[in-house]
Image (cartoon, coloured by chain):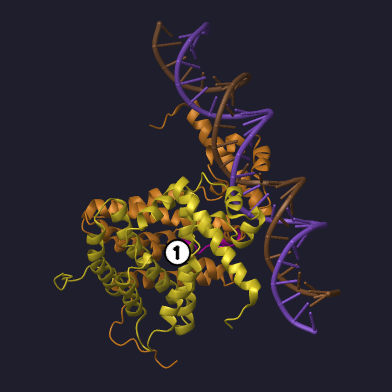
Chain colours: A orange, B yellow, C purple, D brown
DNA sequence: GCGAAATCTTAGACCGAGTATAAAATTTGG
DNA sequence: CCAAATTTTATACTCGGTCTAAGATTTCGC
C-alpha cells in the first residue's frame, strides 16, 4: 500500500514541486501577472505537464482542496453512532483551531494567502466552486444515511454555509488588521455561535425585538 | 426619469437582442459549441460590442441575475417593520410559485434551461458565483439593520443556502423526468419545510410533525 | 537482465475568450 | 447644423487550455 513504485513517487514529488513553485510566484507577483508558461519554465517542466497535473491554473493555488474534502468526509462518516452531524463538525472545528491549522482561518499566514486570492476573480470563483463541492459531498453522505434526498441536500447546504462563514470571519478580521491573537481567542465563540444558530435556527426565539436601535 | 433619450433605449434593445440571439444559439447547439464571434455575427454586431454589454460569455446566458438580485433585495428591504426575514422570504417564494415564475424552478421550461447550464462547467461556476453575490447582498442589508456583522453574514449565508436548495429541488426532479404538475404541487411543501428548518434549526428536537400535508 | 508494452513528458500547432487601441459612426445639446 | 460626447468597429494581441504525434522512461513478463 505504501510501495507504489518509483513512477508514482516521482509523480507526487513533481506535483508538489510544481504547486510550490507556482505558489511562490503567485505570492510575490500576483496571480494574474504569472503565466502558466512561466511556471512551467521555473519548474523545469513543459506547459503540458503543468496542465497534466492541474487542469486549471487556479488549481495550482488551491491544491489542498481534495485533502480537505476527504477530511470533512471522514469527520461525518466516522463520527460516533447516533451523534448529530453538527456535534461532530463543531468538535472538528474546535480541534482545527486548537491545533493552529491554517484552515481554521485564525492564523497569521492567512493574510498573504487571502490577498492573492482576492486579487483574482477567477481564483475566488474557483474557491466558491470548491465550497460547493463540499456541499455536494455532504449531501451524498447524508443521503446515504437517511435516504431523504431533500433533507440531506438542505442540511448539507446549511452546514456548508456555516462552515464557510466560520472560516471567513477570522480571515476577514485578520486581513482588516485585527490582532491575530485576539482573533484566535474570539474564534472559539464564533464557532459555537455559528453552530448554535445552525442547530436552533434563525427564527425569532420568543420576541426578537431590536432592543432599541 | 422614464425619458432616457434615443441612445439609452437603443442600448437596452441591443442588449436584449444580443442576449436573445445568444440564448437561441446556446439552446440549439450547446454553450461551448458556440463562439462569441458567431454570436456577434448572428446579432449583426461586432465581437467588441458583445463584450461591451456582457463582460463574460457566461453572462449572455445568465443575464437575469441583476434583476433577481434587486428583487430579492426589495423583498428584504420593503418587508413590514418587525417581520422576520424568513417570513418575507417564505411568502415571496410562495408567490413566485403561484405566479408560475421561472425562478420558482417548478415549471416545464427549466428542462432546457438547466441542460444547457449543466453542459458547461464555466456556466455552472458562474451561476454559483451569482448565488454567492446574493449572499453578499443579503449580508449587507442585514448588517445595516442590526449592526452585527457576523450575525448578518451567517444568517445571509444560511438564507442563501435555503433559497438555492428550494430552487434546485424541483429543477432536479423535472430534469430527472418527474411530472411537472406533480412537482409544482409538491413545491409548496418543499418551500415550507425548507424555511421551517431554517427557522427552527437542524438540531435534534422532539418530533417535527408536519401539520398533516 | 532484456525487450516489449504501458505510461509520462515534450514540442509545436492550434482555438477561442478577453483586452487594448485608435479610428469611424452616431447621438446629443446648443 | 455643428461640435462634443459616446458608442461601435476593425485589428492586433495575450494567454489559458486542447490536441497530436513523437520521444523518453518506467514497468513487467520472459
Relative vertical location of residue B23 with respect to residue B71 in this rendering, above or below: above
At x 31%, y 71%, the residue is B198
At x 54%, y 68%, the residue is A172
Tell which residue pokes out farthest to the bottom in this image.
A212
Q: Which residue is mark 1?
A: B131
Relative vertical location of residue A19 with respect to residue A193 in this rendering, above or below: above
Could you say where residue B168 lies in the image, as x and y percent from the top left?
A: 34, 60
Q: Is residue B186 left or right of residue A182?
A: left
Q: Is residue B23 left or right of residue A193?
A: right
At x 49%, y 62%, the residue is A105
Could you say where residue A185 lies in the image, as x and y percent from the top left?
A: 47, 71
Q: For this rendering, which residue is in front, C28 or A195?
A: C28
Q: Is residue A112 left or right of residue A4?
A: right
Please state, as top left, top right, bottom left or bottom right, where the C terminus of chain B lies in the image.
Answer: bottom left
Q: Residues within 10 Å of mark 1 (few under 14, many from 20)?
A: some
Q: Is residue A44 left or right of residue A55?
A: right
- Which of the 4 image quadrants contains residue D3? bottom right
Q: Which residues are magenta?
A: A104-113
User: What kind of element bears circle 1?
Assistant: helix
Residue B166 in the magenta stretch? The answer is no
Could you say where residue A141 lies in the image, as x and y percent from the top left?
A: 29, 51
Q: For this rendering, which residue is in front, A21 or A139?
A: A139
Q: Is residue A184 visible?
A: no
At x 42%, y 93%, the residue is A212
What chain is tagged by disc 1? B
- Which of the 4 image quadrants contains residue A193? bottom left
Q: For this rendering, which residue is in front, A185 or B169?
A: B169
Amino acid at each position: 500500500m505504501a510501495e507504489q513504485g518509483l513512477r508514482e513517487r516521482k509523480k507526487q514529488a513533481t506535483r508538489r514541486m510544481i504547486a510550490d513553485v507556482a505558489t511562490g510566484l503567485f505570492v510575490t507577483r500576483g496571480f494574474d501577472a504569472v503565466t502558466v508558461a512561466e511556471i512551467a519554465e521555473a519548474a523545469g517542466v513543459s506547459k503540458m505537464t503543468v496542465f497534466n497535473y492541474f487542469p486549471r491554473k487556479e488549481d495550482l493555488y488551491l491544491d489542498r482542496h481534495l485533502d480537505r474534502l476527504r477530511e470533512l468526509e471522514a469527520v461525518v462518516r466516522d463520527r460516533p453512532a447516533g451523534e448529530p452531524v453538527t456535534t461532530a463538525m463543531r468538535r472538528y472545528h474546535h480541534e482545527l483551531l486548537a491545533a493552529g491549522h491554517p484552515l481554521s482561518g485564525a492564523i497569521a499566514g492567512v493574510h498573504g494567502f487571502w490577498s492573492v486570492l482576492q486579487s483574482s476573480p477567477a481564483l475566488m470563483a474557483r474557491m466558491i466552486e470548491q465550497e460547493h463541492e463540499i456541499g455536494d459531498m455532504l449531501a451524498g453522505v447524508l443521503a446515504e444515511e437517511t435516504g431523504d434526498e431533500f433533507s440531506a441536500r438542505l442540511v448539507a447546504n446549511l452546514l456548508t454555509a456555516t462552515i464557510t462563514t466560520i472560516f471567513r470571519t477570522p480571515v476577514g478580521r485578520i486581513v482588516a488588521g485585527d490582532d491575530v491573537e485576539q482573533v484566535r481567542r474570539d474564534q472559539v465563540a464564533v464557532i459555537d455561535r455559528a453552530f448554535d444558530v445552525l442547530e436552533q435556527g434563525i427564527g425569532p426565539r420568543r420576541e426578537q425585538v431590536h432592543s432599541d436601535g
